[in-house]
């Protein structure tokens, strides 16, 4: 199953993604983790993307697409994966489609986490306050920038997936278990339907 997980910063997408990949035994492909790994490794790509990440800005599409494309051809991705944080822009969604179509495949399910923005800002800032090593992009100005970016660049791609009837809204307010349950209901239904 090829899943795209979309949600605003602080919606709990990372935690729920980790649970879902366990449940389905598929690889978790987090674009943010991939970029942070590049920075940590001190690679050429890492040097190019560092400024974008610390400013809470999106890295250039072409760079992101080539990183993800290289990951998707790894053997562990053959029977599915969960994309967490990618695609985040219309050009990335189009590029993903081209990659998949060329391989005779398609995105099966898009999960959209829904959490009111006021709750989200609170969550991201309290995560930063509680952490011993807060992420450099978890400060108030950057959080607002990341929301802006989500609304302007990422939300529009959902329309594209909705038209295909593959987008499922997940109510993100509730306990971790409740949210996991809602997600399982969606993927279980898909599995039943597709045999
Ligand atoms: P995340 O861990 O998903 O919140 O991503 C952290 C940061 O990595 C973002 O604020 C962006 O700077 C960058 N990033 C992650 N995924 C993408 C993407 N698909 N396109 C562009 N930039 C990204």
Image (cartoon, rainbow, N blue to C red):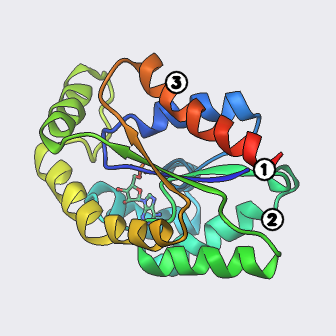
Give the Cα distance between marks 2 and 1: 24 Å
Placement of 57 over or under 29, stated as above or below = below
**Mark 2 / mark 1, whichever is N-terminal:** 2
SS assignment at label 2 = loop
Quadrant housing the C terminus:
top right
Q: Residue at x 43, y 78 (%)?
A: 90
The x and y percentages for residue 63 are 54, 75
SS assignment at label 1 = helix
The disc label shown at residue 73, or none: 2
Q: Residue at x 30, y 23 (%)?
A: 131
Placement of 24 over or under 148, stated as above or below = above
Tell which tag, 2 or 1, sits nearer the viewer. 1
Kindly indicate whether the residue at mark 3 contacts the one at mark 1 (C-beta within 8 angstroms). Answer: no
SS assignment at label 3 = helix
On screen, residue 140 versus residue 185, left or right, reads left
Asked whether residue 27 appears in the rendered view, the answer is no
**Mark 1 / mark 3, whichever is N-terminal:** 3
- Can you tell which quarter of the image residue 50 is in? bottom left
Residue ranking furthest to the front: 193
**Near-viewer residue (15 or 194):** 194
**Near-viewer residue (19 or 107):** 107
Question: Badge 1 local density, few (<14 within 10 Å), some, or many (20+)?
Answer: few
Q: Ligand 1 within 8 A of label 3's CB?
A: no
Residue position for label 3: 181
The disc label shown at residue 160, or none: none
Residue position for label 1: 194
Of the four image quadrants, the one with ligand 1 is: bottom left
Tell which tag, 1 or 3, sits nearer the viewer. 1
The x and y percentages for residue 43 are 59, 62
**Mark 2 / mark 3, whichever is N-terminal:** 2
């Amino acid at each position: 199953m090829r899943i795209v997980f979309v949600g605003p910063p602080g919606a709990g997408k990372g935690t729920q993604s980790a649970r879902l990949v366990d449940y389905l035994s598929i690889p978790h492909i987090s674009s943010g983790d991939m970029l942070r790994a590049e920075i940590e490794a001190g690679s050429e790509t890492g040097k190019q993307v560092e400024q974008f990440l610390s400013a809470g800005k999106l890295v250039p599409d072409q760079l992101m697409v080539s990183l993800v494309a290289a990951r998707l051809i790894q053997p562990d991705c053959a029977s599915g994966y969960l994309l967490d944080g990618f695609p985040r822009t219309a050009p990335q969604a189009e590029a993903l489609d081209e990659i998949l179509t060329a391989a005779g495949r398609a995105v099966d399910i898009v999960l959209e986490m829904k959490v009111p923005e006021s709750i989200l800002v609170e969550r991201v800032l309290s995560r930063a306050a509680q952490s011993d090593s807060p992420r450099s992009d978890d400060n108030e100005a950057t959080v607002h920038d990341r929301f802006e970016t989500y609304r302007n660049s990422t939300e529009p791609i959902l329309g594209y997936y909705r038209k295909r009837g593959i987008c499922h809204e997940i109510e993100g307010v509730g306990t971790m278990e409740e949210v996991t349950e809602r997600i399982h209901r969606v993927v279980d239904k898909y599995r039943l339907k597709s045999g």
